[in-house]
Image (cartoon, grey):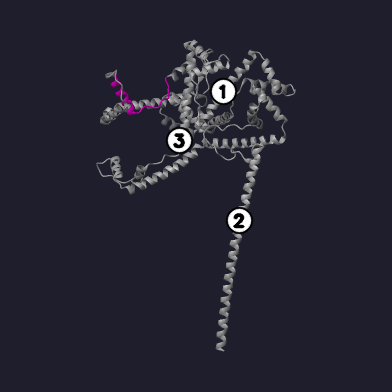
Amino acid sequence: MSRSKSNSRSPIKRSSQTNKVFDEEELDEILENINLKRPRSMYTHFCLEEIEKFKNKNKNKKIDLKTFSKECAKKWKDLSDKEKKKYIDKFEEDKMKYKHDLEVVRHYLFKDYNDVVRSPPTAYRIYLNEKLREGFEKDLDPKKVKAKASKDWRMMSEEDRNIYKERKKDNDDWFEKAKKTRKVTALSLFVQSTIQTAKDKQKDVPTLTDIAPLWKKMSKSEKQKYIDYANDINEEREKLQDIYELVSGVKPKKPAGAFRVFLQEKAKEKALHSLKEGKELWDQLSKEEKDEYLKKAHRCKLAYKYKKMIYNKKIKKILPKRPANAYAQFLKEKKGQKIPKGEKAVVYWREEYENLSKDKKKKYEQKAELEREKYQKKMKEFDNYVFDMPKRPLNAFTLFVKDRIPDLKEDRKNKGLTTQELLKIAAKEWNNEDGVSQSKYEKKAEQDKKRFIRQLKDFETMGYYKRNSRGERTKKEDVDEGEDEDEDEEEEKSKRKMRKKRSSSNASKSTRKGSKRAKSKSKSQDTKRKRSSSKGKKRMGKTQKKK
């Protein structure tokens, strides 16, 4: 979640897409009492009351949970419907509050892009969201608001509808930008500005080696301008990233706490050398300064909980169903059958199942085992699904550096060198290398790019991609040179020989079969000829006798 700026400046006016306007302080008061905890059940409310009664009577005694839980269960069964109504009302109150808190978080923390929270919206969805927000402010029933909005949309003229269609186009463009969001640094902005100025003046475009010393020579005040500009851009891009996470169902990352955010800020300023110094500086802060960090952390926590709720809903739809046990298989068969009057279904069917013979029980146990095996196979496939954004592809030079730097570190000549110095050595080797070795890494980069495109398409359509998909695995052509290539060549030769042997053996078998078939055919033909000739001779003999 994007973090709001400190209150040292003038208070920022935050306007929701309704006509309501809030100051920063008013929003903090609204969000301070929200935790987004799930509502407690009726039985938990009852148990909490019993615990309080026990503590008031026996202040020094400790609660034995096993015995206490059994006693609570017995008491809960003995309660009448009137006595249970009190706990039912408490549960409904918690449920209503939880729903209200969810709507508040969605309206005020994600208010700049409420139309894009669930999916890239249609024109009707944008109109409906507007009406729902107005109803939320006026405490109207959402079902009645939806019914009225659908009737008004049907009766609406095309001119009024075109307003929402134009807004849909803007939202679609905004969603496409959210896919390509990446963080920006002050140095990268300085590099872009220097290159642009050189192009405008029609000069030679400078390289990174020419720009790096200029950045070092700059004063702190000039560097601070680029740092502030980078922070402003990153805040806007974090909002876009929130859209993408909500719509596509990306697994959200846990936010940092107040103390950790404080340490990160001091580390960027290079004002920290150890955790002890960080704790001392944290203790020196006033209550107002600490409250600012705590408010930021609380907002980030609420946004994280809301995003995780949507993420869990998306995964539950894809998860395979759990297998039914033997007793559940028995109940499936008995579904729809009538029970004798005056008996409870749960007790009746349980007694019947327990009175079954071992052979009949085995039948249901075998069905349960088959379902369990199917479930395990599906879960293995589900383990290969990745719900995070696929990693961006690497270029040929970065792949070369990944392979080369560990070898350079092991070399004795390079002891004591920093990573930047090792990168310079690797860059020189890359420039001096032959085209053959460079082409090897270029092929790897192309494969990585294809992998990224394929995974991204799957991720956009389904919300996940498979880890062990084709193209991600390395082929034998991409193996490093030297001994590994020789071993692979030998393996390939042995495989070719085996294939030739198999083909030759198959051919010999086919020729044998063919010769046998030919012999059998020739024999059958000879026997037919003999029979025909013997029949002809007999006929000739009969005619001669008649004459």
Q: Which residue matches tag 1?
A: 236
Of tags 3 and 1, which is closer to the observer?
3
Q: Amino acid at mark 3?
A: Lys
Q: How many marks?
A: 3
Residue 61, by quadrant, is top left
Q: CA distance from mark 2 to mark 1?
A: 69 Å
The picture places residue 343, in percent across and down from the top left corner, at 26, 41
Q: Which residue matches tag 3?
A: 316
Q: Is residue 44 magenta?
A: yes
Residue 505, by quadrant, is bottom right
Q: Earlier in the sequence, mark 3 or mark 1?
A: 1
Q: Which residue matches tag 2?
A: 505
Quadrant location of the C terminus?
bottom right
The picture places residue 300, in percent across and down from the top left corner, at 49, 22
Element at label 3: helix
Camera-nearest residue between 413 and 405: 413
Q: Is residue 477 magenta?
A: no
Question: What residue is drawn where x is 67% and y is 15%?
Answer: 218
Residue range of the region highlighted in magenta in the rendering: 33-55
Taking the image as shown, residue 213 lies to the left or right of residue 116, namely right
Q: Earlier in the sequence, mark 3 or mark 2?
A: 3
Q: Is residue 19 visible?
A: no
Question: What residue is drawn where x is 54% and y is 15%?
Answer: 274
Q: Is residue 329 above or below residue 524?
A: above
Question: What residue is drawn where x is 71% and y is 32%?
Answer: 433
Q: Are marks 3 and 1 in contact (CB under 8 Å)?
A: no
Q: CA distance from mark 3 to mark 1?
A: 31 Å
Q: Earlier in the sequence, mark 2 or mark 1?
A: 1
